[in-house]
Image (cartoon, grey):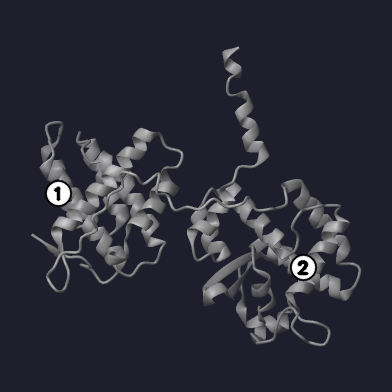
């Protein structure tokens, strides 16, 4: 029996539909001689077919394995993780999946795996889309053919090599913040500037986004401020910062009134410029005795992203936090720092 490619109203639900059909097909067409509890196995297969949520499918896949059936282990991780990856791409139709997306996914997900594991993931993904090729139809009754061939995907990887971004190390961040406290005492303007630089350092905002913040964009959420941002490409996102970092800078009267007034402006109530903010960053760097090849607000943005990756190892979180349109842009923050590379010097120590 064939099914409409976009079987459900949303991409995520349609993808889950195909996952359930594929898993059930594999379970029923491969050897079941290792199954210990036939009744539980059959019941779990039915539950998988009726599942609408990916977490349910994962749960039942583990349950099937506990029945003594390991035939689906080969497909479990590659396809479930593919669902999470594609969900973050905000696709609207199954037709939008293409070979480039799949190569990106495999490159990002299996980079540290052995060649054997990479081969298994490649075959699992290929089998999944071959199954869809044979069992789908479009509204005109013709089949949508993906024709996925991933045999040479490593050679065809489209992830570009990027320069390692320049950023502040942890000791330099401390020095920068100490200098920032001294800097803000010099004048009312510098006092304002110090909070602008903190916002960039602690949220990864672009300078253009920073300068466009209005009081109506700021909401209090417990011990946090939530700031609504319209970023590059008119893309909406939210950033958060701890209230204690901003002290009493935000005028409570303005926050309560939700005015359209800019938060950061000159003494004449004019909008500040990006060049002005960059000069403020450079001045604080000099005070902190920090020398970098590249300066300005992007140095602080890179610093935020690098710290975020080091502490979470979540490149998708970086993509959302920084408002990147493409995951490849976020990948530059997965670089190894010297402390990590130093770990390679003692891997043979226990042999002597």
Q: Quadrant of the N terminus?
A: bottom left
- Left or right side of 146 for 169: right
In the image, is residue 116 above or below residue 346?
below
Q: How many marks?
A: 2
Which residue is at 76% across, 60% downward? 295
- Left or right side of 97 for 136: left
Which residue is at 69% across, 62% downward? 298
Q: Earlier in the sequence, mark 1 or mark 2?
A: 1
Q: Secondary structure at mark 1?
A: helix
Instruction: Give the image quarter of residue 198.
Output: bottom right
Mark 1 surroundings: few (<14), some (14-19) or many (≥20) residues within 10 A: some
Residue 278 - label: 2
Q: Secondary structure at mark 2?
A: helix
- Left or right side of 336 for 263: right
Q: Which residue is mark 1?
A: 25
Instruction: Give the image quarter of residue 41.
Output: top left
105 or 43, nearer to the observer: 105
Residue 223 visible at all: no
Query: Where residue 331 appears, x then y in whole percent?
Result: 53, 53
Residue 296 visible at all: yes
């Amino acid at each position: 029996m064939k099914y409409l490619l976009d079987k459900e109203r949303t991409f995520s639900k349609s993808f889950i539909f195909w996952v359930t059909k594929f898993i059930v097909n594999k379970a029923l067409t491969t050897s079941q001689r290792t199954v210990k509890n036939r009744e539980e196995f059959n019941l779990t297969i039915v539950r998988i077919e009726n599942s609408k949520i990916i977490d349910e499918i994962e749960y039942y896949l583990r349950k099937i394995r506990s029945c003594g059936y390991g035939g689906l282990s080969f497909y479990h991780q590659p396809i479930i993780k593919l669902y999470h990856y594609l969900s973050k791409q905000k696709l609207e139709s199954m037709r939008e999946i293409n070979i480039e997306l799949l190569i990106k996914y495999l490159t990002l997900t299996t980079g540290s795996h052995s060649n054997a594991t990479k081969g298994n993931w490649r075959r699992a993904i290929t089998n999944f889309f071959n199954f869809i090729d044979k069992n789908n139809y479009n509204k005109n009754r013709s089949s949508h053919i993906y024709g996925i061939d991933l045999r040479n995907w490593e050679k065809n990887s489209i992830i570009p090599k990027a320069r390692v971004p320049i950023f502040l190390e942890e000791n330099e961040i401390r020095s920068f913040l100490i200098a920032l406290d001294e800097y803000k005492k010099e004048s009312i303007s510098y006092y304002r500037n110090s909070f602008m630089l903190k916002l960039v350092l602690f949220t990864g905002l672009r300078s253009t986004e920073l300068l466009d913040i209005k009081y109506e964009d700021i909401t209090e959420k417990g011990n946090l401020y939530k700031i609504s941002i319209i970023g590059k490409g008119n893309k909406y996102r939210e950033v958060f910062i701890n209230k204690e970092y901003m002290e009493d800078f935000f005028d409570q009267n303005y926050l309560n009134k939700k005015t359209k007034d800019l938060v950061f402006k000159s003494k004449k109530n004019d909008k500040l410029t990006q060049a002005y903010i960059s000069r403020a960053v450079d001045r604080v760097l000099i005070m902190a005795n920090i020398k970098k090849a590249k300066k300005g607000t992007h140095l602080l943005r890179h610093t935020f992203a690098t710290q975020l990756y080091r502490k979470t190892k979540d490149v998708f979180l970086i993509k959302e936090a920084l408002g990147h349109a493409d995951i490849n842009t976020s990948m530059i923050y997965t670089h190894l720092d010297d402390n990590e590379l130093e770990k390679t010097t003692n891997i043979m120590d226990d042999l002597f």
